[in-house]
Image (tube, rainbow, N blue to C red):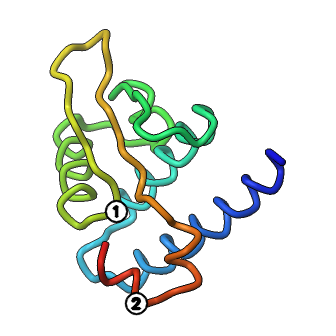
């Protein structure tokens, strides 16, 4: 069952990446950070929300500037790819809400516009 869920979510992730490829606002750093978020989401058994730390995400995404990290994560939230709730507490971590029904959006392009 877990393998089936992984397959579904990987397909949905692929759809989101294709959407990012068509989005003129999205740069390589956004995609890299989004991929790091996907890895963290996968490690949290695809639960949403899940907790992340800036240190881990910057390491996974190979972003070295905290200013770039904050700009990209804020923009991913603004553009509707994730929902980001900063904690402002270094030990606690921030919450990330993954887009709901990503598999359905993959199969229904009209749903993508509602996101």
**Count of numbered circles on the image:** 2
Residue 13 x/y as whole percent: 57, 64
Residue linked to disc 2 = 110
Question: Residue at left 33%, top 54%?
Answer: 82
Classify residue 58 by image quadrant.
Answer: top left
Q: Is residue 55 above or below residue 105?
A: above
Element class at badge 1: loop
Cα separation between marks 2 and 1:
16 Å
Q: Quarter of the image containing the C terminus?
A: bottom left
Q: Residues within 10 Å of mark 2 (few under 14, many from 20)?
A: few
Residue linked to disc 1 = 81
Q: Is residue 52 above or below residue 70?
A: above
Q: Nearer the viewer, residue 20 or 77?
A: 77
Residue 105 x/y as whole percent: 49, 77
Question: Residue at left 34%, top 62%?
Answer: 81
Q: Is residue 8 left or right of residue 76?
A: right
Residue 77 x/y as whole percent: 23, 55
Element class at badge 2: helix
């Amino acid at each position: 069952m877990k393998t089936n869920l992984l397959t579904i979510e990987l397909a949905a992730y692929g759809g989101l990446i294709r959407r990012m490829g068509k989005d003129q606002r999205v740069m390589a750093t956004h995609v890299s950070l989004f991929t790091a978020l996907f890895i963290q989401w996968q490690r949290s058994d695809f639960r949403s929300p899940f907790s992340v730390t800036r240190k881990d995400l910057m390491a996974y995404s190979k972003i070295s500037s905290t200013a770039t990290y904050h700009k990209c994560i804020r923009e991913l939230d603004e553009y509707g790819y994730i929902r980001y709730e900063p904690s402002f507490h270094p030990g606690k971590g921030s919450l990330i809400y993954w887009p709901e029904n990503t598999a359905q959006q993959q199969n229904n392009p009209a749903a993508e516009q509602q996101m």
